[in-house]
Image (tube, rainbow, N blue to C red):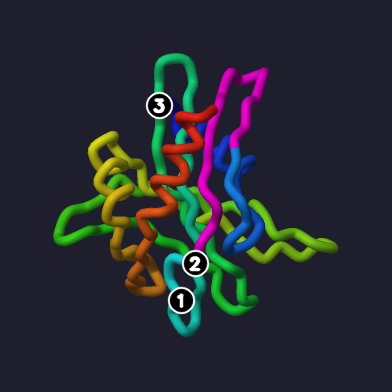
Amino acid sequence: MTRLALFLLGLALAACSPGAPGGTLVTGDSALAGAYSRSRVISDHPHHVLLGHVAVIRRGDGVTRALIVAQRRDGVHRLSYREAWQTGHELPWSRLDRTTDGCLAGTCRNRTLGMIALSPAMMDHAARHGLSATLIGRHGAIAIHAPAALFSDAADRDRAR
């Protein structure tokens, strides 16, 4: 699956606020189908709140699983990360950097920063233990933790779809 296809579906799947319910989506034109978890705060750094939701996206025989990371805009910093690391290993991070949700009267509060692509084994492990990582970018490093419930929620919705 192309990064662009995942990005386009990620935009459609982006949850508006922490705790917003997950769901499923099928797009007829692009033959994409997906399931996604609710959105949760995955880092409550004193100056930056990051949200995450997990998406499982299918196109033909291809399946992409990802933790999608967004910034709750505070009007001060526009965060940008170029890498994700977990216990000394680089994770497959892709920058997306788009305003996607939380728009009201011309003001958008959430910006998708990027995603960590997950292999089937990583997804299974994260569904049992969650996923902790460190994002690194021009504003320094920030720790994130996505709870196991996000991964199992997306996987359950995908199976039920």
Nearest the eye: 32 or 7: 32
Disc 1 from disc 3: Cα separation? 30 Å
- Badge 1 is on which residue? 44
Residue type at mark 1 is: Asp
The kind of secondary structure element at disc 2 is: strand
Q: Which residue shows up at 40% across the image and 45% down it?
A: 152
- Per the image, is 31 magenta? yes
Question: Badge 3, how many Cα within 10 Å: few under 14, some, many 20+?
Answer: some
Disc 1 from disc 2: Cα separation? 7 Å
Residue sticking out furthest to the top = 60
Q: Which residue shows up at 47% across the image and 84% down it?
A: 46
N-terminal-most mark, 1 or 3? 1
Q: Can you tell which mark lies on residue 123?
A: none
User: How far across and how far down the image is residue 20, in percent?
Assistant: 62, 56
The kind of secondary structure element at disc 3 is: strand
Quadrant where the C terminus sits is top right
The kind of secondary structure element at disc 1 is: strand
Residue 95 makes an appearance in the image: no
Quadrant where the N terminus sits is top left
- Badge 2 is on which residue? 41
- Badge 3 is on which residue? 63
* Segment tinted magenta in the rendering: 24-41
Nearest the eye: 132 or 85: 132
Q: Which residue shows up at 35% across the image and 64% down it?
A: 145
Residue type at mark 3 is: Val
Question: Residue 134 is drawn in which quadrant?
Answer: bottom left
Question: Badge 1, how many Cα within 10 Å: few under 14, some, many 20+?
Answer: some
43 relative to 82, above or below: below
User: How far across and how far down the image is residue 113, in percent?
Assistant: 49, 56
